[in-house]
Amino acid sequence: MKRILLIIIRNIFRLPYIYFRLFYYALRTNNYSDEHKYAFIKKFTKWIVSAGRVNIEIYGLENIPEENGFMFFPNHQGLFDGFAIVEACPVPFSTVYKQELKNIPFLKQLFTCVKAISLDRKDVWQGADVIKQVTKEVKDGRNYMLFAEGTRSRNKNQLMDFKGGSVKSAVRAKCPIMPVALIDSYKVFDTGTIAKVTVQVHFLDVLYYEDYKELSAVKIADLVKGAIENTIAEYST
């Protein structure tokens, strides 16, 4: 909370511009390209990172597929994760988010801009529809980020189980799957400090359809988790 207040204070004169610009794009989201809206999102993310005394170290940009229509799966440490990935990732992407966030100001407009999909985790049928929608959009060339743990681990750099269901859209779309390792992202918003912090974002080796087509969704999720765990073990201090 302290760091959030610090970011607000340091960006107090920018906040009206950020909010109303997001509101403007949200109302006209189909009138602007994903690249145009994403450039703006990266702009204010950079302000958040700078004001929050956060340093982002980025690894593995060369692993990002050249063609759109891929999915990446980071571990989920805290509230800063999405900002860290936006700061690091050069290409636009969408995401799936829990329905409880749907009407929160700022987040509502942000999710609308990236055409994110809300998920009611208690509704199995709606979850099946989300898988179908993500599959279709990935086939059509949209990139997606999903947190395969389903919720924040709340245990620093330790991972929870990766859910097999989270990769079903990727399997059905036969798209590239990229693990993403976040290290120390929890320190930004999920601790009570405003000390300088470094967050690492590692884009890991991609799994292409030929690599995983014979595997079950659970096994694929385990491979993604294992790659992330190995990277955290190697790079965390």
Image (spheres, rainbow, N blue to C red):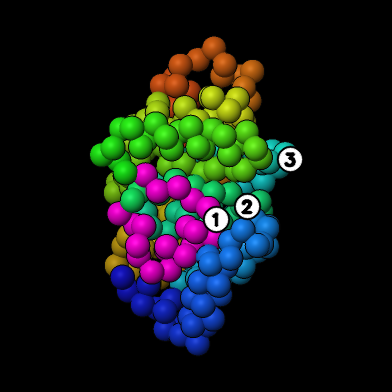
Which residue lies under the disc numbered 1?
A: 114
Residue type beneath disc 1: Val
Q: Amino acid at mark 2?
A: Pro
Q: CA distance from mark 3 to mark 2?
A: 12 Å
Q: Position of residue 18 (x, y in %)?
A: 52, 76
Question: Judging from the image, what secondary structure is the residue with disc 3 in?
Answer: loop
Q: Which residue is mark 3?
A: 66
Q: Residue furthest right?
A: 66
Q: Are marks 1 and 2 in contact (CB under 8 Å)?
A: yes
Label annotation for residue 172: none
Instruction: Check if residue 107 falls in the magenta segment.
Output: yes
Q: Counting residues from the N terminus, which is met first, the one under dot 1 or under dot 2?
A: 2
* For discs 3 and 2, the disc positioned in front in the rendered view: 2
- Which residue of the protein is positioned furthest toward the bottom in this rendering? 13
Give percent across and percent down for residue 68: 68, 41
- Residue at 35%, 65% in the rendered image: 104
Residue placed most toward the observer, 70 or 112: 112
Counting other residues with Cα less than 10 Å from the Cα at mark 1, is it few (<14), some (14-19), or many (20 or more)?
many
For residue 87, above or below residue 124: below
Q: Is 153 displayed left or right of 223 in the figure? A: left
SS of the residue under disc 2: loop
In this view, 143 is above or below 163: below
Q: Which residue is mark 2?
A: 92
Mark 3 or mark 2, earlier in chain: 3
How far apart marks 1 and 2 lie (CA) works out to 8 Å
| Residue 121 seen in the figure | yes
- Measured from the top left, where is residue 173 in percent x and y? 58, 28
**Quadrant location of the N terminus?**
bottom left
